[in-house]
Image: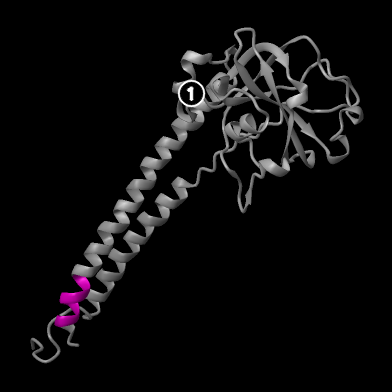
């Protein structure tokens, strides 16, 4: 292929690739702005004064964007006979989340993640303190249901094996009325009156949003710049110059 023909092919292809790289870089800049806004919004929620957990009328509007990680408060009675253990890995090691439905005074039910249990504390008698009875007050973070299961592991309600906090499936498995059960759950904060060495341990919610968009944007824009530098270098070297068969003398 002659230099001129090579230039006719490479220059348009390089221009198209340059536009693509700029588009990818700009997209990452937009994603960076979105991620920063998300982080700021969640930070504001987790430090805000707790509000009442959404009631029935508000359930349809409870979404991750609108409500997840909002500090909430609710009152009711734990249905401890319908609790479920969901496999978990935390800063305290591997074990289980103890999820227990809370019956509220208005007849609705909200699942509460009361905290982490190590394997040796599966049985209530091994937890170091008595199950709560009567009306309790719960403060925690509103969380969105986790359908189906974890990566490569699906919930098995028939065997009572749970790998994610799938509220609809837990509700059905425990025979609770779906229409009266909130579609979200609450990660309970640690009880300040709980003695050390007793279980479950609440307040272990991990909030982490990977934010590598600036690095990605710099990478795409850097590649676009290198492409331009490469084209200029090739042009100055004559690689994209006049046809070799008819050189200008």
Image point 88% across, 28% down: which residue?
Answer: 127
Q: Position of residue 19 (x, y in %)?
A: 25, 57
Q: Which residues are magenta?
A: 4-11
Q: Compared to 214, does 5 lie above or below?
A: below
Element at label 1: loop
Q: Please, what is the dominant secondary structure of the magenta stretch?
A: helix
- Which residue appears at 19% of the width and 80% of the height? 6
Is residue 2 positioned above or below 59 on the image? below
Work out whether residue 158 or residue 84 is closer to the camera in this orientation and state it: 158
Q: What residue is at 81 percent from the left and 13 percent from the top? A: 133
- The question of residue 9 being in magenta is answered with yes
Q: Nearer the viewer, residue 167 or 63?
A: 167
- Is disc 1 surrounded by few (<14), some (14 to 19) or many (20+) residues within 10 Å? some
Q: Residue at x 51, y 15 (%)?
A: 56
Q: Please name whichever residue, 152 or 68, is drawn nearer the observer in this view of the structure.
A: 152
Can you identify the residue that label 1 sits on?
A: 62
In the image, is residue 63 part of the stretch drawn in magenta? Answer: no
């Amino acid at each position: 292929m002659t230099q001129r023909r090579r230039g006719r092919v490479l220059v348009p292809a390089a221009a198209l690739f340059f536009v693509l790289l700029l588009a990818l870089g700009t997209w990452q800049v937009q994603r960076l702005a979105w991620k920063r806004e998300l982080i700021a919004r969640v930070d504001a929620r987790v430090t805000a004064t707790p509000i009442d957990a959404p009631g029935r009328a508000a359930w349809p509007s409870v979404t991750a964007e609108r409500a997840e990680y909002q500090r909430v408060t609710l009152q009711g009675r734990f249905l401890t006979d319908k609790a479920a253990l969901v496999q978990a890995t935390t800063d305290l090691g591997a074990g289980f989340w103890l999820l227990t439905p809370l019956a509220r005074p208005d007849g609705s039910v909200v699942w509460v993640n009361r905290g982490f249990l190590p394997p040796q504390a599966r049985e209530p008698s091994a937890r170091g303190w008595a199950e709560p009875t009567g009306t309790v007050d719960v403060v925690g973070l509103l969380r969105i249901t986790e359908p189906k299961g974890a990566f490569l592991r699906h919930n098995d309600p028939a065997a009572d094996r749970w790998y994610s906090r799938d509220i609809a499936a837990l509700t059905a498995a425990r025979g609770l009325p779906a229409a009266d059960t909130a579609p979200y759950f609450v990660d309970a904060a640690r009880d300040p009156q709980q003695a050390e060495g007793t279980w479950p341990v609440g307040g272990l919610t991990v909030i982490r949003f990977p934010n590598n968009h600036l690095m990605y944007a710099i990478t795409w824009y850097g590649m676009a710049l290198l492409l331009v530098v490469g084209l200029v270098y090739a042009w100055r070297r004559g690689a994209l110059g006049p046809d070799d068969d008819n050189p200008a003398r």
